[in-house]
Amino acid sequence: MSCSRCQGLMLEDQMIDMEGGYGEMWSRSWRCVNCGHRDDAVLRHHRQLQATPIATIPQAVTVEETPELPWESESVEPLAA
């Protein structure tokens, strides 16, 4: 198995959940040797819940024309730097 972040080697790892509702619980997960990324069933489930498909309807964009301004009629004063 390869890591989804860095494509490194993933090894199966035993983890203990110290804050579990039923006391200490051992679980299996995958850990990347290269970057330390962890992957297990709970993490995948939470990522799927957060990932919402984006559905957009393509809309035509209208560009308003800018009016032509007569620059000769305005007085321009030079600004000091």
Image (cartoon, rainbow, N blue to C red):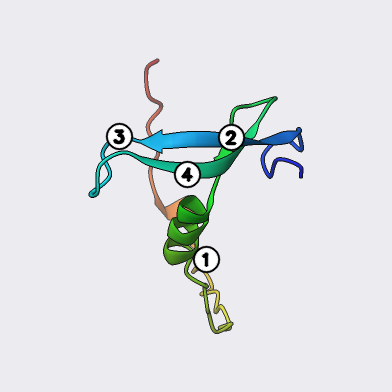
Residues marked 3 and 2 touching at CB (< 8 Å):
no
Pointer 4 residue: 27
Q: Quadrant of the N terminus?
A: top right
The first of marks 1 and 4 along the sequence is 4
Quadrant location, the C terminus: top left
Secondary structure at numbered mark 3: loop
Mark 3, residue position = 18
Against 11, is 50 above or below? below
Q: Are marks 1 and 3 in contact (CB under 8 Å)?
A: no
Q: Is residue 70 visible?
A: no
Residue in front for this viewpoint, 31 or 5: 31
Q: Which of the two residues, 81 or 47, is positioned nearer the viewer here?
A: 47
Q: Left or right? Give the position of 80 relative to 38.
A: left
- What amino acid type should be assigned to the residue bearing mark 2? Asp
Crowding near the residue tagged with mark 1, few <14, some 14–19, many ≥20 C-alpha atoms within 10 Å: few
Which residue has dot 2 on it? 13
Q: CA distance from mark 4 to mark 3?
A: 11 Å
Q: Estimate the x, y position of residue 63 in percent, counting from the top left.
A: 55, 74
Mark positioned earlier in the residue sequence (2 or 1): 2
